[in-house]
Image: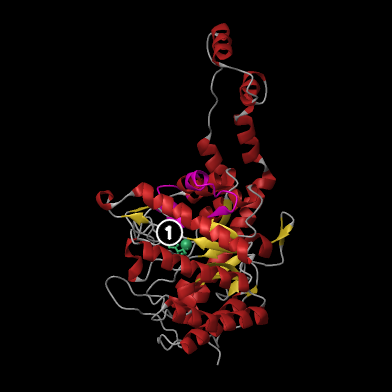
Amino acid sequence: MAAFPEVSKIQYEGPKSRNPLAFRWYNPDEVVEGKTMRDHLRFSVVYWHTFRGTGSDPFGAGTMQRPWDDQSNSVENAQRRVRAAFEFMEKLQAPFYAFHDRDVAPEGQTLAESNRNFDEVVKVLKEEQQRTGIKLLWGTANLFSNPRYMHGAATTCNADVFAYAAAQVKKCLEVTKELGGENYVFWGGREGYQNLFNTDMKRELDHLGRFFHLAVDYAKEIGFHGTFLIEPKPKEPTKHQYDSDAAACINFLRAYGLTERFKLNIETNHATLAGHTMMHELDYAGMQGMLGSIDANTGDLLLGWDTDQFPTNLYLTAEVMLILLKYGGLAPGGVNFDAKVRRESFEPIDLFHAHIGGMDAFARGLKIAAEIRAGGELAAFVKQRYASWDAGIGAEIEAGKADFRKLESYILAKGEAAPNHSGRQEMLENLINYYI
Ligand code: XUL
Ligand code: CO
C-alpha cells in the first residue's frame, strides 16, 4: 500500500506555476555553470526528522500522523518505514538520504541484538536503493540518545562506554560501506561538558582524538573510502560541545593529525548558535580545504535553540551557494535537509511541502549566486579592494621579501600610509539585492 497515495512524482513546472506540489526552480537537468542542478545540489533527505520525528516537545506529546508507522519498535515496522521513506524520496526526486543507525532499526537489549535488527533493516534499505537508484549520502551512529551516553561517548569518563561507542561505530561503518555511503558523519552530541569542576578536558579531548584514529584505522582495514565529516555545533545538548565551530574543529583535527581523512559538515542552525553566519562557517572551512558537506536548515531569530527549520530564505541560500561555487562545489558531500516540519504541520503531505520549499530555495539560490558571479561586480570589487597587495610593498610582504626594518624604512621615507578607500558595504548590499 502506498504511503503517499495522493502524491505523484514532483515535477518542475517553472517559476509561474501555482501548483504547491511542483518545483518552480529546481529543475534537475538544468545546467548552471557547466553542471546540472542535480549535481550541484546533491539533495539529501534525513531519516531522523522526516521518518522518526514525532512532533513531541518538552511540553507535549507527538502530533505527527504517519499511517504507515504502527509506532511499535518491531523490525517489521522499521522495514515498512523504509518502503515509505523510499516512496517519499523517489516522488521528491531526492538523489540521497542520510541516517543514524538507531533511526533505521530498533535498538535491542544487547549490542548483538541491535546489530541483528540493523542487518534486517539494511537488507530492505539495500533493496530499495537498488530499486530506486537513491544513494546513501552518509551514515552515522547515534551516540547520544541512549542513557549510557549521558557523560559522552568518545569523551565519557566511563571507559566501557567508550568501548560500546567504538563497537557501535564499527558496525555503522560496515553498514555504511555495504550501502555505498559516500561519507560518514560524527556529530559530537554529548562530546562536551556541563561543568568544568568534574571534567578533565585534556583527557577527554585525547580520547576523542584516539576514537577518530580508531575509526580511520578500521575504515582502512575494511576498505571504506568515504569522507569522514565532523559536524560542528557549540552547545545543545551539552553546555559546551568540543566541536564547537569550524575553527575549533579544524584546530582539533590538526592537533591530533586527522586532517587528511576528515572534512566538515557545516549546519546552518549550528553556525548561528555558535554566533557565526553560515557564510562565515562555509568560507572558513572552504579556505582551509575542509568543506565537506552541509546540513541545510535554518533557525529562528527569536528562538535561541536548534529549531531545525526548513530553509526558505533566498538571501541565505544565495549566500550559501556563492561560497559553495567559490570552492568548486560539495561532492562527495551534498545539501542534506537536517530539518523538521513544525509540530503543527502534522500531515504526511507537509513533508512534501517542506522539502519542495527547501529544494526550490536552494535551486533559486544557486541561480542567483551564478548570476552574481557572471555579473562579476562583486569579485571585481574585492579584487580591487586588495590591489595594494598585487604590486609594490604589498607584493613584497606576501612574497616574504620584507622584514620589519624594510617596512620601517619604507614608511619613514613615505611619511604616511596611502589613503584608505571606502569599503562600500551598503553599495554591495544593494548590488546583492539587485540579483535577488
Ligand atoms: C543535531 C544534528 C544531528 C547530526 C547527525 O543537532 O544536527 O542530527 O546532523 O547526528
Ligand atoms: Co545536523
Q: Give the percent coordinates (x, y) of residue 352.
A: 53, 75
Quarter occupied by residue 92? bottom right
Q: Which residue is mark 1?
A: 188
Of the four image quadrants, the one with ligand 1 is: bottom left
Front position in the image: 322 or 225: 225
Residue at horizontal 57%, vertical 8%? Answer: 409
Decide if residue 217 is on the left or right side of residue 150: right
Q: Which residues are magenta?
A: 251-277
Figure coloring: secondary structure
Residue at horizontal 59%, vertical 83%? Answer: 123
Query: Magenta stretch: residue 258 in it?
Result: yes
Residue 236 makes an appearance in the image: yes
Front position in the image: 268 or 145: 145
Q: Is residue 203 above or below residue 43?
A: above
Residue at horizontal 50%, vertical 38%? Answer: 426
Quadrant including the N terminus: bottom right
Decide if residue 144 is on the left or right side of residue 130: left
Q: Amino acid at mark 1?
A: Gly
Front position in the image: 428 or 53: 53
Q: Please, what secondary structure does the residue beneath circle 1 have? A: loop
Residues packed near mark 1 inside 10 Å, few (<14), some (14 to 19) or many (20 plus): many
Quarter occupied by residue 12? bottom right
Residue ranking furthest to the bottom: 1
Decide if residue 169 is on the left or right side of residue 64: right
Q: Give the percent coordinates (x, y) of residue 127.
A: 63, 83
Residue ranking furthest to the top: 413
Q: Give the percent coordinates (x, y) of residue 18.
A: 57, 73
Query: Magenta stretch: residue 114 in it?
Result: no
Residue ranking furthest to the left: 197
Residue 232 makes an appearance in the image: no
Front position in the image: 136 or 298: 136
